[in-house]
Image (cartoon, rainbow, N blue to C red):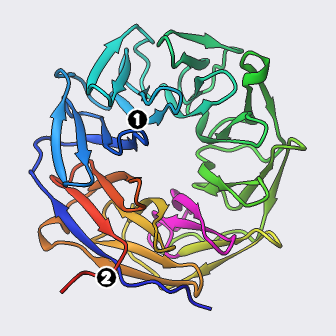
């Protein structure tokens, strides 16, 4: 039976912003309700007030390219800590004062950490190594940080992560040979587990089902990886996934996923032709919806208040919409002035009311998604 939802629509939020590769994701401050976009190559933090649609720049100028990648909200004090990517310093935002602070020295390596999780156990953030050699642990009360666990020599190791019901944090293997596990209850003990065929660029993030089992999204891998955190096991599930018509070697297939209200998981097509549905009851996969052309179409998926899942436009000229109840896939129109270009928005942020805001990477404006019918 269909959920009682109304059509969504999109809105361009100005002013127009200068530069390229501006922002790499963002985060909601639950305490204040404001949204903060993380500077990639932009020079300042971007603040969005979702109640008034006001967009403003805050904090000092911060030179450099691809500096930080997304941020983590700290419920203990309302602060946001950004994840160092190519930046050599930490970035902390205090939404109660709009203070933006950079400090410390975490090294000059490129693409250091990819994903991070806040722990309620010790009120610390744990950053997942990409090219960094160790896990980065941040004390969110003091801002102090340290490198913990064994030294890893591999590159492009883990992309994204998740947290289990016991508070342990896991890194999703991209080029790494095993899954990363961090246990904050043991002071941040770092271990590895899992057994699957070795390869490069295999999975990129993923999502937990309602039972706490994690499903990793296939990038170059031919199958979905199921990670059972309780039993510390990994299993390849479902049939091998067809490569995209425009990517015959099956690279960069999906760029994110989301759990639907029906308990199924939906993967957002990047270079794959169609949406991938993971049936978490019987561990099968199937394609749904029409076939789409183009590389790097959408990345990152979010479930808005209408129950639909939305995929953020990268090179695609529309917003992907998935109706989980009927497995219908549509593309919503966006403003004509924003259709052209590539890598338009990088990720999104859900506000306190369940509205979705797309973070501008090469697009010059913020894109707001209204998950309801437009008033006449």
Query: Which sits in the foreground, 356 or 242?
Result: 356
Tell me if I can see residue 84 in this picture. no
Q: Main secondary structure of the magenta part?
A: loop
Q: Is residue 9 magenta?
A: no
**Mark 1 and mark 2 residues within 8 Å of each other at the beta carbon:** no
The residue located at (44%, 70%) in the rendering is 246
192 up-or-down from 296: above or below:
above
Q: Quadrant of residue 237?
A: bottom right
Q: Earlier in the sequence, mark 1 or mark 2?
A: 1
Element under disc 1: strand
Q: Which residue is mark 2?
A: 373
Residue that protrudes farthest toward the bottom in the picture: 1
Q: What's the mark number on residue 69?
A: 1
Camera-nearest label, 1 or 2: 2
Query: Which sits in the foreground, 235 or 147?
Result: 147
Q: Position of residue 100 (x, y in %)?
A: 28, 22
Q: Which residues are magenta?
A: 246-274
Left or right of 353? Residue 190 is: right
Element under disc 2: loop
Q: Position of residue 123 (x, y in %)?
A: 60, 23
Identify the image quadrant of the N terminus: bottom right
The residue located at (34%, 71%) in the rendering is 319
180 up-or-down from 373: above or below:
above
């Amino acid at each position: 039976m269909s959920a009682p939802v109304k059509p969504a629509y999109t809105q361009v939020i100005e002013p127009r912003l200068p530069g390229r590769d501006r922002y790499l994701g963002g985060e909601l401050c639950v305490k204040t309700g404001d949204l903060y976009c993380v500077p990639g190559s932009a020079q300042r933090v971007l603040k969005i007030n979702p109640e008034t649609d006001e967009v403003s720049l805050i904090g000092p100028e911060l030179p450099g390219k691809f500096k930080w990648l997304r941020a983590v909200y700290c419920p203990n004090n309302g602060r946001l800590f950004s994840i160092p990517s190519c930046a050599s310093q930490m970035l902390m935002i205090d939404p109660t004062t709009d203070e933006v602070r950079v400090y410390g020295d975490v090294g000059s390596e490129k693409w250091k950490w990819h994903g991070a999780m806040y722990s309620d156990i010790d009120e610390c953030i744990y950053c997942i190594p990409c090219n960094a050699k160790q896990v980065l642990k941040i004390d969110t009360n003091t801002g102090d940080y340290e490198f913990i666990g064994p030294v890893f020599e591999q590159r492009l190791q883990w992309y994204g992560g998740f947290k289990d019901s016991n508070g342990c944090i896991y890194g999703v293997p991209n080029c790494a040979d095993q899954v990363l596990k961090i246990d904050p209850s043991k002071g941040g003990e770092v271990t590895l587990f899992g057994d699957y065929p070795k390869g490069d660029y295999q999975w990129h993030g993923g999502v937990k089902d309602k039972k706490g089992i994690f499903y990793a999204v296939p990038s170059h891998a031919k199958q979905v990886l199921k990670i059972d955190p309780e039993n510390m096991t990994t299993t390849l599930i479902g049939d091998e996934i067809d490569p995209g018509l425009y990517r015959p070697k099956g690279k960069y297939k999906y760029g994110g996923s989301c759990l639907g209200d029906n308990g199924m998981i939906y993967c957002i097509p990047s270079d794959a032709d169609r949406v991938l549905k993971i049936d978490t009851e019987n561990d099968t996969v199937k394609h749904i919806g029409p076939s789409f052309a183009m590389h790097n179409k959408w990345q990152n998926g979010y479930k808005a208040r209408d129950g639909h899942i939305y995929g953020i436009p990268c090179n695609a000229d529309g917003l992907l919409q998935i109706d989980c109840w009927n497995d219908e896939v549509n593309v919503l129109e966006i403003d004509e002035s924003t259709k052209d270009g590539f890598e338009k928005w990088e990720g999104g942020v859900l506000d306190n009311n369940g509205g979705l805001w797309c973070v501008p990477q090469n697009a010059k404006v913020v894109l707001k998604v209204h998950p309801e019918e437009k008033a006449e």
